[in-house]
């Protein structure tokens, strides 16, 4: 959004002042994160900038910590566990969240507000409380320190994001399309697959990505539920900070930052595509 040509000097001052202030706040928030990136290329085993790095000397930078991460079997296993658990949890959360959102989108759904509040509770309740509750519940079910227990716990945390994004997408869905498909002989599954799903797919994918990020970055639930075989990347980073501090953690953190940025860019592209499908201009 830009200023009109007839804007007064006071309006222009407020407009550009607000943009500058917003840029400074954003810089203040992301600077501590961005500092990690150059530190991960430090040739020395330090968590600070060396004189050579400040002088931009090529020999002061190295990929040794990335190589150390790739050569360490613990980090390899942690990365595999994180990807496997996150993919399974995302699949469960996406299916359950999409079905719940479709049901809650119907006007005749009883106790709709109450059910919605229960579904999004894991996103509101402090994660330490949710983790403690899941620990007692899944231990009672015999799923403590198992991959199944960790996957289900992460799915519980990711489902609210799917419910919210899919519900927002369904707000612009014309239910008469489903009725028209039914009048032409399409069953519920065919109507959902060929009529509703293509229109709400951006919201489903966005919710799935949020669920994936939630699972991939989760550490508190893993500390409660996971055993040695389910050690994930955040759990490995936690253990590394407590037991053996190594700049390898900076390399892993840099990779996680890159993955988060790519996922956020994907979410923004999906949001714009969803707006185009609904005929909403981004300007």
Image (cartoon, rainbow, N blue to C red):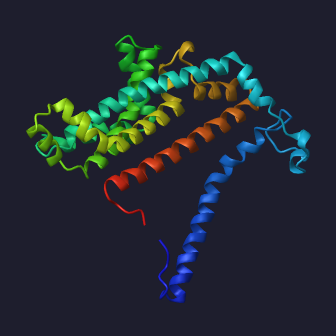
Residue 45, image x and y in percent?
A: 83, 32
- Observer-nearest of 137 and 5: 5
Q: Residue furthest top?
A: 142
Rendering quarter of residue 201: top left
Judge from the rendering whether residue 63 lies leftward or rightward of residue 10; answer left or right: right
Residue at 30% x, 30% y is 96
The answer to whether residue 125 is seen in the rendering is no
Q: Is residue 142 above or below residue 91?
A: above
Residue at 74% x, 19% y is 71
Q: Is residue 240 above or below residue 116?
A: above
Residue at 34% x, 13% y is 141
How many numbered discs?
0
Rendering quarter of residue 248: top right
Q: Residue furthest front?
A: 184
Rendering quarter of residue 101: top left
Residue 116, image x and y in percent?
A: 25, 41
Residue 221, image x and y in percent?
A: 48, 27
Residue at 66% x, 47% y is 33
Judge from the rendering whether residue 86 lies leftward or rightward of residue 186; answer left or right: right
Q: Residue furthest left?
A: 183
Q: Quadrant of the C terminus?
A: bottom left
The answer to whether residue 22 is seen in the rendering is yes
Residue 92, image x and y in percent?
A: 36, 26
Judge from the rendering whether residue 124 lies leftward or rightward of residue 214; answer left or right: left
- Observer-nearest of 151 and 165: 165
């Amino acid at each position: 959004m830009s200023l009109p040509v007839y804007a007064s000097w006071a309006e222009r001052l407020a407009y550009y002042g607000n943009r500058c202030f917003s840029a400074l706040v954003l810089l203040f928030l992301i600077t501590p994160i961005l500092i990690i990136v150059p530190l991960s290329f430090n040739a020395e085993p330090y968590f600070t900038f060396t004189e050579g790095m400040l002088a931009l000397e090529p020999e002061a930078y190295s990929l040794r910590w990335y190589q150390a991460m790739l050569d360490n079997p613990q980090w390899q296993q942690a990365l595999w566990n994180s990807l496997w658990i996150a993919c399974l949890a995302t699949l469960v959360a996406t299916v359950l969240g999409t079905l719940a959102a479709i049901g809650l989108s119907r006007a005749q759904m009883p106790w709709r507000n109450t059910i919605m509040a229960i579904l999004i509770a894991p996103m509101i309740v402090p994660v330490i409380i949710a983790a403690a509750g899941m620990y007692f519940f899944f231990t009672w079910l015999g799923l403590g320190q198992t991959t199944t227990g960790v996957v289900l716990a992460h799915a519980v945390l990711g489902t609210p994001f799917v419910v919210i994004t899919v519900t927002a997408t369904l707000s612009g869905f014309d239910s008469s399309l489903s009725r028209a498909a039914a009048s032409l002989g399409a069953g519920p599954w065919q109507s959902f697959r060929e009529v509703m799903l293509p229109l709400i797919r951006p919201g489903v994918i966005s919710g799935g990505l949020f669920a994936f990020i939630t699972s991939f970055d989760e550490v508190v639930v893993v500390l409660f539920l996971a055993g040695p075989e389910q050690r994930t990347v955040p759990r490995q980073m936690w253990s590394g900070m407590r037991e053996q501090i190594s700049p390898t953690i900076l390399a892993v953190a840099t990779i996680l930052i890159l993955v988060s940025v790519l996922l956020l860019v994907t979410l923004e592209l999906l949001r714009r595509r969803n707006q185009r499908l609904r005929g909403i201009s981004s300007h």
